Amino acid sequence: MTNKQKSVVAVIDYGMGNLHSVAKALEHVADENTQIIITSDPATIDAADRVLLPGVGAIRDCIGEMHNTGLIPSIRKAMAEKPFLAICVGIQSLMSHSEENDGVDCLNHFQGTALFFGEAHKDYDGSKLKVPHIGWNQVSQAIKHPLWKDIPDNERFYFVHSFYVVPENKNEVAGTCDYGLNFCVALAKDNVFAVQFHPEKSHKYGLQLYKNFINWDGKP
C-alpha cells in the first residue's frame, strides 16, 4: 500500500449526465492513486483535483438543473482553478447561448453559440443527412494539446447530438468534424477542455482521452 494521497476526479452529478458509464470509463484508466467520485456536493467538487462535467438531454434542463442544485458557483470555480473537462451537452453548456428550446443563456465560459443542424440538413452533394448526428465520425485535431496525447489525428469518436458549437474565438477550437459542414467538436482554453463526442462510448481512444485528462496538469 502506498501512503501517497489520492488524486480525486469529481464527476459532477446535477441530474443530467450518463454518470456511471463515465465514471466506469475513468476508473478503467485510473491508477491506484486516483479516486473517481460522482458527486453533487459543492465542497467535494471544490476540493477535487480535477472536475468533469457530463451532460445529456436538452440544454434548458441542463442549465436549469445546474441552477437548481446550486452547483454553478462550484463549476465556475473549478473552471478557474483546475483541470476541467466537459463532454457532450457539457460543451454546449459552456457557450454563451444555445438556440435550443427557443434560446437558452449558458455559462459563457466560451463566447459563442450552439446551433441546430436543422431538420433539412444536407450533405455536400445535396443528399439528406439524419439529425441527430449519431455514430462514429472522424475528429481532426486543430491544435496540439495534452488531451490529444497518443491519439492519432482523424481518429473516430462516437457522437449523439443535434446541436453544434460555434465559438467566436477560432483559436479556442481544438478539434473539428465533418457532417454536411465542418464544425467544432472540441474547445480548449487554459485549464478547460470540452468535447462534443462521448469518450466513454469511443473505445480505445476515448479511454485514452480520459487517461490523458487524469494525468493532465491543466496547462495547454
Image (spheres, rainbow, N blue to C red):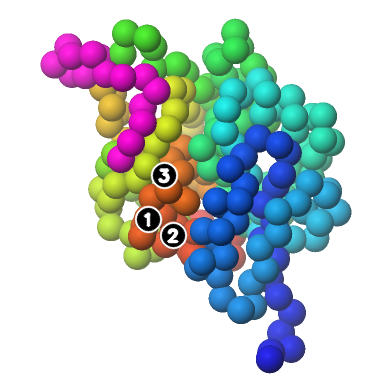
Cα gap from disc 2 to disc 3, whole angstroms: 18 Å
Taking the view exactly as shown, the residue that stands out farthest to the bottom is: 1
- 162 sits left or right of 137 in the view: right
Q: Which of 100 and 17 is in front in this view?
A: 17
In the image, residue 98 above or below residue 82: above
Residue at image mark 2: 207
User: Dot 3: within a 10 Å radius of its alpha carbon, few (fewer than 14), some, or many (20 or more) residues?
Assistant: many
Which amino acid type is shown beneath numbered disc 3?
A: Ala
In the image, residue 137 above or below residue 106: below
User: Dot 2: within a 10 Å radius of its alpha carbon, few (fewer than 14), some, or many (20 or more) residues?
Assistant: many
The label nearer to you, 3 versus 1, is 1
What x and y, as percent, mark residue 12? 70, 47
Q: Which of marks 2 and 3 is nearer the N terminus?
A: 3
Residue appearing at x 53%, y 22% in the figure: 113
Which amino acid type is shown beneath numbered disc 2?
A: Leu
Q: What element carries label 2?
A: helix
Q: What element carries label 3?
A: strand
- 94 sits left or right of 121 in the view: right
- Magenta-drawn segment: 122-136
- Residue 59 seen from this side: yes
Quarter holding residue 106:
top right
- 94 sits left or right of 115 in the view: right
Q: Which of marks 3 and 1 is nearer the N terminus?
A: 3
